[in-house]
Image: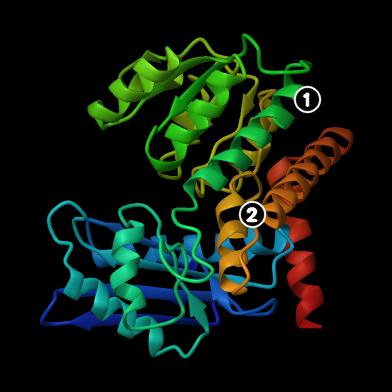
Amino acid sequence: MFDTAAFANHESVHQFYDKDTGLKAIIAIHSTALGPAAGGCRMWNYVNSEAAMRDALRLSEGMSYKNAIADLPLGGGKAVIWGDSKTQKSPELFRAFGQAIDSLNGRYWSAEDVGVSPDDMKYVSEQTRFVAGLDDGDSASGDPSPITALGVFKGIEATAKRALKVDNLEGVRIAVQGVGHVGGYVCDFLAKAGAKLIITDINKESLKQVSQKTGAVIVAPDDIYDADADVFSPNALGAIINDNTLARLKVKAIAGGANNQLATDEMGEKLRQAGILYAPDFVINGGGIINVASEISGLYSLPWVKSKVETLTQTLGQILDTASSEARPSSEIALELAKARIAAAHS
């Protein structure tokens, strides 16, 4: 683990196993310089333990930068549960996961992510107070996906304004990859703004519902990269911007809620050279963690959350403008800003 690029100087990495429930979990804590580590829990059927570890490390590091960019008093951490979310979930498994979190004594706060719901988090909360994204409680705010989607939508607006020289999204063609928790809400916002949608997902029922609601055109998962669109919005899993997909994209901008969209750091410069404006993922998708941060504070405030999302959108605009004026990748500009904030907290 220490020799992999994904390790990225993590403070600590914890592995948990519970024989009775079958729980296999990893909690990675990248940084607590700005505050306790916070990041959601993902349940995924990884091909092997190495893939699970790599995902936990990359997602955890990304949360450090996401929380720093959003100017939150939180560090970066992430949890993954290795298993099939469709067949291996149980209340006992999530209670065991709650005990794992509690053993870290507040160094890590969890919420839901891919494959995990607020209902699952309810069982986690029976064993630890270090959990957010709940439906019940004094400061509960429920699923943060709608707020994440709001931030992504505003980020798409800001990116399209600069890449397409438009004042709004009326008639703008947007290819949306993934219409689940976040992507579905993003499509709602986009349709109301007058955008023309092309969508894909592996879940056919979700595709049907979103298409009926928004008038979106459905394409096969692999065909989304060839879509005749102005903006590509990835809202599923990461590493989907690579040499193969870049060669197929016809868009002028990429702006979506998926984590770790770039397969390699070098893709940022390749996107710039290709004339594609990229909204760094850990900036545009920060709405959810802002929502979670308000819940963690114990005094949840929706006006405060929306104000922070607006500020984050302004930060994204500044990053995109700097990237343009300096002829540098936007991903590089965003990373420098996040690391500078973390370094300042360390010092």
Q: Amino acid at mark 1?
A: Arg
- Color encoding of the figure: rainbow
The vertical placement of 246 against 98, above or below, is above
Residue at 81% of width from left, 83% of height from top?
A: 347
Residue 39 visible at all: yes
* Left or right of 25, for residue 105: right
Report x, y in % for residue 234: 49, 34
Report x, y in % for residue 328: 79, 40
Report x, y in % for residue 321: 84, 36
Residue at 47% of width from left, 91% of height from top?
A: 105
Q: Few, some or many C-alpha atoms within 10 Å of disc 1 (few <14, some 14-19, many ≥20)?
A: some
The answer for how far apart the CA atoms under marks 1 and 2 are is 29 Å
Q: How many marks?
A: 2
Residue at 29% of width from left, 66% of height from top?
A: 81
The vertical placement of 192 against 57, above or below, is above
Residue that label 1 marks: 162
Nearer the observer: mark 1 or 2; the answer is: 2
Nearest to N terminus: mark 1 or mark 2: 1
Name the element at disc 1.
Answer: helix
Name the element at disc 2.
Answer: helix
Q: Which mark is residue 128?
A: none
Q: Amino acid at mark 2?
A: Leu
Residue 262 visible at all: no
Residue that label 2 marks: 302
Image quadrant assignment for residue 322: top right
Q: Are marks 1 and 2 in contact (CB under 8 Å)?
A: no
Residue at 77% of width from left, 74% of height from top?
A: 343
Q: Nearer the viewer, residue 218 or 259?
A: 218
